[in-house]
Image: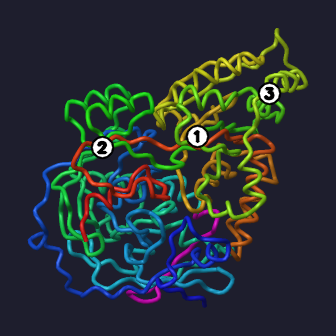
Amino acid sequence: MSTHSSDRDVTWPSIGLVTAIVVAAVCGFATPLAAQHSTSLDGCPARQPILRIAMVSGGESYSSHPAETRFSSTTFTRLHQMPLIGADPKEERIDAAYGAAESWSYLPGAKGLVVKLRDGLTFNDGAPITAEDIVFSLALAKSKFADPQISGTLAGIGVTAKVIDRKTVQFDFAHGSPTFDIEISTAVFPFYVTSKAYHSNGEISEEAFDRFRAKPLAAGPYRVVGRQAKEFITLVADRKDPLLGCPVYDRIEIREVLETGTRMNQFRTGQFDIISGSRDLLDQAKSVGAKVYYKPDANMIGFYFFQSDRKDNVFHDVRVRQAAAYAIDHKLIAEAIWNGVGLKPWGCSWPPSTEISTKNLRFAKACGTPYPYDPAKASKLLAAAGYSASKKPTIRLEYNVSYPEEGAFAEAAQQMLNAVGFNAVVARVTVTERNRRRATGEHVNTILFFGSGGRFTSLAGSYSVYGPNQNWGPKHDPDVIRALKRASAADTVEEYMEATADLAELVHGRAYGPGFFSSGSVWFVRKGIPDWGLEKSHGRGPLNLAALVTRR
C-alpha cells in the first residue's frame, strides 16, 4: 500500500513529470480536529453585509444537492458542502487540509484507495460525518440522478466502496485508477459528502432528491436559503467552518445574467460587486474604477462534432468534420472578437490545457497544433465527400452562452462555413434543451461549442463528451473507446498520460474536437474587494470564492 503525506505537496504549475506522478496521489496528515470543535460564529470577526456576483455560467443549474453540482459549481458549492478530498482555496494543489479526508493511500496497482476521515467534522445540523456517509455519497454520485460527468466517470472506473470502520472507507476499482484522488477532488469534479440519514434515510430517488433540494443540509460555512435553477443561488453565513474558517459576508448572491451589456450597466450602478465581463467593455470598466482580472485558460474555444456514430449525420464522415475545421480562420476570430487578449493556440477542444498530460510530448504535439485556416482544402474535402454548390450539407451551429463572446463566434463561424460550401444556421439553446437533444439523439448535423474550463485531469470531462454511453461520443470509433478505457484503467500515471495522449491524437486527427485556442475569462471587480488569486488559479471553476469569502 502506497501512502503519501502533505510534506510533498507542490504548486502545480511548477511540477515536472516525476513530480506529477507524486502529486497524482498526494495527500496529507493534518492535525486531527478536536471532537468537540466549536462551529459557533461568536468568535468570528465582524462580517461584511453582502457580496453580489453576476456571471455567465453556461447554464449552471444552481442546485443545492451535492450530487448535482455542475461544471461551474466550485464557484459556490464548496461554501455550503464538504468535499471528500479538497484543494487549497486558490486551486493550485490538492490539499488534505481542505477536505473530509485526513489521509488516503493507494492499494497496489492503483486498484483501490483507502481513505481515513478527519475527526470532528460535522454537517451543519451537528451530525458527524462518517464512513457510512461516504459510501452512501458514492451511490448518489453513481446514480442516474447525479451529474453525468461524475456518474459517467465513476461508471468507467468501476468504483465501489465499503466501510472498514467508522473513520475508514475503502474504494475499489474494476481497473487501476492512479488519478482517482485528483478526479474526485475540488480541483477537477468534486465528490461532496451527503448525510445518509438526512437524505430520506438513504433513499435514492427523484423524490428524495426533490426533498433534499427543498430543504438542503449544509456542510460548510454558508447554507443555501434561496435558489432557482439556471437563475440564482443565495447563501448566508451559517457557522465557523472547521476547515475554511469564518464567513466574511453575511450574504452572498450569485445570479445568472446572460447579456453582457445588462451586467455592465448593473455593475456601473452598484447592483453587483463582481461580474463576468467581456473584452469590448474593458475601457468602460476601467472608467468606473473597476479592477480587471483574467482567469487563464478558462474556456477552450473550438468545435465539438457529436453523435458522429449516426450514419444520417453529415459529420459521420471525417472529411466533413475536417472541412469545417479548415474553414475557420481562428486567428482572425481571435483578433476581431477576443482582441487577441489572453489567448493560446490549442489543437483539441478536449482535454484542456491544464491537464497533467501536457507533460507528454505526444499530447502536447496533438493538442498544441490548431487546424490551420485553409478554405480551399475545406472545399475540396466537401467535394470529396459528395457535396457541391447544388448539394450543400445543412448544419446547425448550436451554442448556449458559456462565455460572453460565444454568440459573436457563432455568427463569424457561420459566414466562414458557408463560404466553403456549408449551409449553416445558428441556434442558441438553453442547457435544458441541449441536454434534451443529447438524450434523444438530436445532435446530428450539429456543431456544438462551449467553454470547458481548466482541470488537472480530464477523465470526467472526456467521458462526458466522448464516453460510449453519454449520447454524444463517437460510439462507432473503437480507438476512442479503447483510449478512454485505457485512461480509466491505468495502473500508473504514466499509463494514464499515454492513454490521454492517444485520445488527444484521435480527437484532433479525426476532428471530433479540433480546437482553435484557449481563452482567459475576464472579471470586473469593484473597489475594496481584495485579490483572491483568480489569475493564479489553475482549478476548474471561473473563480474560487472560498479564498475570498472565508477567513481562516
The amino acid on which the numbered mark 3 sits, given as a three-letter code, is Asp
State yes or no: residue 4 in magenta.
Answer: no
According to the picture, the residue beneath numbered tag 3 turns out to be 374
**Residue under the image location 44 percent in, 72 percent down:** 85
Quarter-of-image position of residue 129: bottom left
* Marks 1, 2: nearer the viewer: 2
State the CA–CA distance, disc 2 to disc 3.
Answer: 40 Å
In which quadrant is the C terminus drawn?
A: bottom left
Q: Reply above or below: 61 against 488.
A: above
When the figure is inspected, residue 233 is found, relative to residue 187, above or below; the finding is above
Residue highlighted by disc 2: 525
Segment colored magenta: 154-168
Horizontal and vertical percent for residue 536?
45, 58
Q: Are marks 2 and 3 in contact (CB under 8 Å)?
A: no
At a point 64% along the width and 20% down the height, the residue shown is 414
User: Can I make out residue 232 in this image?
Assistant: no
**Residue 552 horizontal side relative to residue 537, left or right:** left
For this orientation, the residue located farthest to the right is 384
The image quarter containing residue 343 is top right
